[in-house]
Every structure is written in structure tokens, then in C-alpha cells.
Image: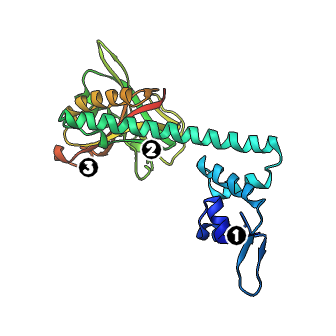
């Protein structure tokens, strides 16, 4: 038998770590002297120690290693465990690769002294909600305010109950020579039947690249272009129409420089 110090030297596992392995029932000593408390290991346990070191070198946690060792003699079970861990590592690698790509593009854009920073763009999920919706064509973006006025007038007698936050959203469906087909939505708690040109519907949750912006609406065109380029350069692709969420708007703020708009582009991985 080997004293714990000798076993540590041969296995390249520290004495403190061997004691920890004993505590978690990963690698227990073959014998513990009841008078001195000294731990002793059998030479055959070097095989287990080597397996632990090898599995640790694959980046596996001690909890996973413990599960694997319990079925080490079953080749199929061992193969299945390793395949699962490989899949997780590949997923982690894909995530890390994407994070590095985002860092590289952010650094590049900062070197170009662009007024908008990549750090301002977030990937998030806009939640599922029930909305009141109104859609028609407008000539210019500045006419969007007319849609909100019209929706307010059309629903005036319905006593709608809006959620908090209300998710005031403008979706730009189509651009043509005549103008922009624009839909506006407000999240509500009610369930009602459609009116002639006002609709009530459920909107599914959606993953977006978003940038929250403070200031006047005319500056949004530059932001749209910036986000579109960011999506292309960071391994995503568009999967829907861009939309704006108005957190602070003319509805509750008269000073345009205090308006807060979240520009959202629906995305998915390439």
C-alpha cells in the first residue's frame, strides 16, 4: 500500500485534492488507520487516479467524472457520457466563438470612431403579448404619429386596459414608392373581437438585436443601418420586419431629446 504522500507524487494529484476526493466519494483511500487517521492507497487505485486526471483534462466536472467512473466498465455508457459532454463543449465553443467575433467587431468600430458603439446592442427576447393593432400606409416616418392618434380615436370607447409596460410598437412591413406600410401595436390585457380596421391578436415572443436610443426620431435611420451591419458581421441574419418600441414618446414627453426608443431587428443564427 502507498501512503497518501507517495500516492500523490505518483498520481500527480495533490494531498489536499486527494482528501477532497475522499470527502465527495470520488476516490476513497483503501485504508485509513483508525489510530493515526493516515490514509493509504492501493497501487491499483493509480488506474482510477489516472482516469480522473484524464477526464479532468477534457474539461469535465468532478460530478460528471463521478458518474462516468460508476459505469466505466460499460463501454456504451461511457461512450454516451462522452458524446453528451462533447456536444456541450461544442455548444460552449460556438458561444465563445460568437462572443470573440462580437468583441472583434466592437473593437474595429471603436477604432473607426463611430458615434454608436457595439456595446449598446443587446440580444434579447421580446415577450409574448396580446395587442391592439392598427395598420395602414404612411408617406414618411414622420407621419407615424397620425397612426397613434387614429388608433386612440378608434378605440376611445372600448375602455382598453394596457399592460405595464405597454409595449408601444411600430412595425415597418413594406417600403414602396407610395410610402411605408406601418403597423402600430399596444399590449393589452383584454380579449376582444376585431373591429373594422382595428385588430386584436396574440404576438409570439421573438429574439431581437436591439439598441435603445435617446433623442429625436430622425436619427433612427443611421441607427437602422448600423444595426443591420452589426447583424451581418456577427453571425446572425434577419428573420422578420424591424420595429421600434417607444419607452418614452410624445405621448408622455414633450421634449424630443428625452424620448427613448428601442430599435429592434428580429434575428436568428446563420
Q: Is residue 58 visible?
A: yes
Q: Is residue 39 above or below residue 46?
A: below
Q: CA distance from mark 2 to mark 3?
A: 17 Å
Residue 52 vertical position relative to residue 3 in the rendered view, above or below: above
Labels 1 and 3 touching (C-beta < 8 A) = no
- CA distance separating discs 1 and 2: 57 Å
Disc 3 crowd rating (10 Å Cα; few below 14, some 14-19, many 20+) is few
What residue is disc 3 on? 252
Quadrant of the image occupied by residue 62:
bottom right
* Residue pictured at 79% horizontal, 55% vertical: 70
Residue 72 in the figure: left or right of residue 245 = right
Camera-nearest label, 1 or 2: 1
Q: Which residue in the protein does label 1 denote?
A: 22
**Residue 159: x, y in percent?**
43, 48
The secondary element bearing badge 3 is classed as loop
Q: Is residue 188 above or below residue 222?
A: below
Amino acid at each position: 500500500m502507498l501512503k497518501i504522500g507517495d500516492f500523490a507524487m505518483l498520481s500527480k494529484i495533490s494531498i489536499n485534492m486527494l482528501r477532497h476526493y475522499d470527502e465527495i466519494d470520488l476516490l476513497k483511500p483503501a485504508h485509513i488507520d483508525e489510530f493515526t487517521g493516515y490514509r493509504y492507497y492501493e497501487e491499483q487505485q493509480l488506474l482510477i487516479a489516472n482516469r480522473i486526471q484524464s477526464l479532468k483534462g477534457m474539461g469535465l466536472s468532478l460530478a460528471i467524472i463521478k458518474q462516468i467512473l460508476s459505469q466505466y466498465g460499460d463501454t456504451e455508457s461511457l461512450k454516451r457520457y462522452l458524446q453528451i459532454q462533447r456536444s456541450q463543449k461544442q455548444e460552449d465553443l460556438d458561444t465563445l466563438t460568437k462572443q470573440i467575433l462580437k468583441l472583434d467587431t466592437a473593437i474595429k468600430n471603436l477604432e473607426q470612431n463611430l458615434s454608436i458603439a457595439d456595446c449598446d446592442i443587446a440580444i434579447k427576447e421580446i415577450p409574448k403579448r396580446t395587442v391592439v393593432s392598427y395598420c395602414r400606409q404612411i408617406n414618411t416616418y414622420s407621419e407615424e404619429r397620425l397612426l397613434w392618434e387614429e388608433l386612440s380615436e378608434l378605440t376611445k370607447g372600448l375602455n382598453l386596459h394596457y399592460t405595464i409596460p405597454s409595449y408601444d410598437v411600430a412595425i415597418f412591413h413594406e417600403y414602396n414608392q407610395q410610402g411605408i406600410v406601418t403597423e402600430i401595436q399596444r399590449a393589452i390585457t383584454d380579449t376582444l373581437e376585431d373591429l373594422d380596421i382595428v385588430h386584436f391578436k396574440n404576438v409570439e415572443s421573438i429574439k431581437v438585436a436591439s439598441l435603445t436610443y435617446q433623442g429625436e426620431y430622425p436619427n433612427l435611420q443611421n441607427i437602422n443601418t448600423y444595426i443591420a451591419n452589426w447583424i451581418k458581421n456577427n453571425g446572425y441574419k434577419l428573420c422578420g420586419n424591424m420595429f421600434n418600441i417607444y419607452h418614452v414618446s410624445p405621448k408622455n414627453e414633450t421634449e424630443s431629446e428625452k424620448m427613448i426608443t428601442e430599435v429592434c431587428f428580429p434575428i436568428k443564427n446563420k
